[in-house]
Image: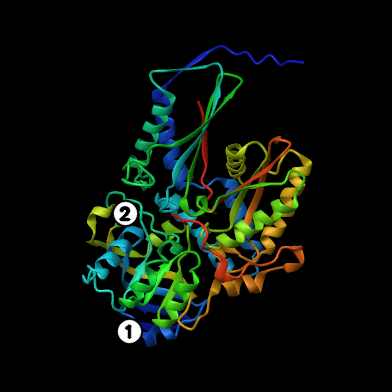
Amino acid sequence: MTTDTTTSVREIHVDEITAKISELCESATHFLPDDVVGGLERARDSEKSDLGKQVLIEILENIDIAKNEMVPLCQDTGTAVVFVELGQDVHIVGGSLADAINRGVAKGYTDSYLRASIVDHPFSSRVNTKDNTPAVTHIDVTPGNALKLKLLPKGGGCENMSRFAVFLPSAGKEPIVEMVLKTIEESGGNPCPPLVVGVGVGGSSEYAMYLAKKGVVRSVGNPSDDPETAEFERELLEKVNALGVGPQAVGGLNTALAVNIETYPAHITALPVAVNLQCHSARLKEATL
Amino acid sequence: MPIEKRDGQIRLTAPLSEEDVAQLHAGDHVLFDGSMYTARDAAHKRIIAGAEKGEAPPIELQGQIIYYVGPTPARPGRIIGSAGPTTSMRMDPFTPKMLELGVKMIIGKGGRGPAVRQALQDNKAVYCLAIGGAGALLSKTIRNLEVVAYDDLGTESIKKLEVDGFPAIVCCDSHGGDLLQQGKDQWRQQDKLGSYQPIQAAAAEKSNGGGN
């Protein structure tokens, strides 16, 4: 059976995209999503370590101050990672989509007093581009004529703890468990726990890391639709929290708020696995045009 | 008073002496008053490069506090933007030399490698954690900011901050105590971890770049 997803072609001007991205830069860096705040509140209430509890109390105070006084949640306002769901019946007019997104990032980071953290040539000059461009953009083409934009300001502390490995095809879950636990234990306080842990399993090497990032974007309290994957997520979360790393690695029961696994079919020879960590300041905002 | 203990609180003001920092132990809550200097990767690199050529550092480091931070720009009418700590490990290659130059207190986030932990003991100095990702909360304790060196480095320039009750937790003390190892040892639930075995502190946190 095929589904008729035909919609009428709709024009969207690049200036609308630029304006929306700019808004998302400010809101994402100042207002934490409700599901993340809820996860942090549950962590605070369940934490048995005194120091760990105190850290969580101050993290929650920070969220209120950021919101009420318009101070960015964290000084690392990140790399602007943009996920675009582009309806196949959208016709973008007035310029290129990539330029529209970059102009929005430049405007948002400048107008909202966010830190410009991007340097140009990564292994040589490393001159700051001054407006946090370019963004890292991922585009999915979807049915329909809507344009959905998600902005993930991704901080360096957690992003730099990413890992990728390819295991033997029949290795099963064991090496994945070992890799996730080792990544989190080795990273200690660097990625700012409690974390959202994104795990990408399958696909090709670059796609596995993309899947891990999709796991991060799934945020807190949204288990996988696949029952077997959801069960593995629960198992991994329990193990991660048994590590004892705790909030800011001072020791405690809450090392992660969620483990989100995204899967994709893989080649007969390979079990690719990527881990992408997200700090407790799990900033993410989306809008649909 | 460089160190004052009252109402169950430890308050610290630079310049600090060996005797002051010797009173601090991993896990202690502390509040900073007075001045501290910001420095991160680029500023450390310049200070150390200068020292190797026999040049004096651009600021007096004896007994001082270094805070690893690169704040967001201040909104109009404000002193500073968001101002939380960055990953300390990136400064590990420079830290023993900074301690030899007289720094007595460092504030950042995440653990330190074995060479830094040893240098803290050898030089009688302390490393504290500020809460990573609490830049809005921490910014409220900052009363004044003055760029004092390397203005061209922008967010990475050396700034003199005046603070009032800046909160931190002692992580690596001058006696060899390490909060991150102690915390993990205390809270690990090995029965739930199956065959997974803990890694030792010496091997941890040296793999990648760190950030923020």
Residue B58 percent across, percent down from the top left: 22, 67
Dot 1: element:
loop
Separation of residues labelled 2 and 1 (CA atoms): 31 Å
| Chain designation of label 1 | B
- Tell me, yes or no, if residue B170 can be seen here: no
Label 2 amino acid?
Answer: Thr
- Quarter holding the N terminus of chain A is top right
User: Residue visible at 68% across and 14% down?
Assistant: A4
User: Residue visible at 38% across and 20% down?
Assistant: A95
| Chain designation of label 2 | B
Dot 2: element:
helix
- Tell me, yes or no, if residue B89 can be seen here: yes
Residue A229 percent across, percent down from the top left: 74, 43
Using the image as rendered, state which of residue A47 and residue B109 is in the foreground.
B109
Whether residues under marks 2 and 1 lie with C-beta atoms below 8 angstroms apart, the answer is: no
Residue A27 percent across, percent down from the top left: 45, 42
Label 2 crowding class (10 Å Cα cut-off): few <14, some 14-19, many 20+? some
Label 1 crowding class (10 Å Cα cut-off): few <14, some 14-19, many 20+? few
Quadrant of the rendered image containing residue A250: bottom right
Q: Tell me which numbered mark, 2 or 1, is placed earlier along the sequence.
A: 1
Mark number, residue B1:
1
Label 1 amino acid?
Answer: Met
Mark number, residue B155:
2
Q: Is residue A68 left or right of residue A257?
A: left
Quadrant of the rendered image containing residue A56: bottom right
Using the image as rendered, state which of residue B136 and residue B193 is in the foreground.
B193
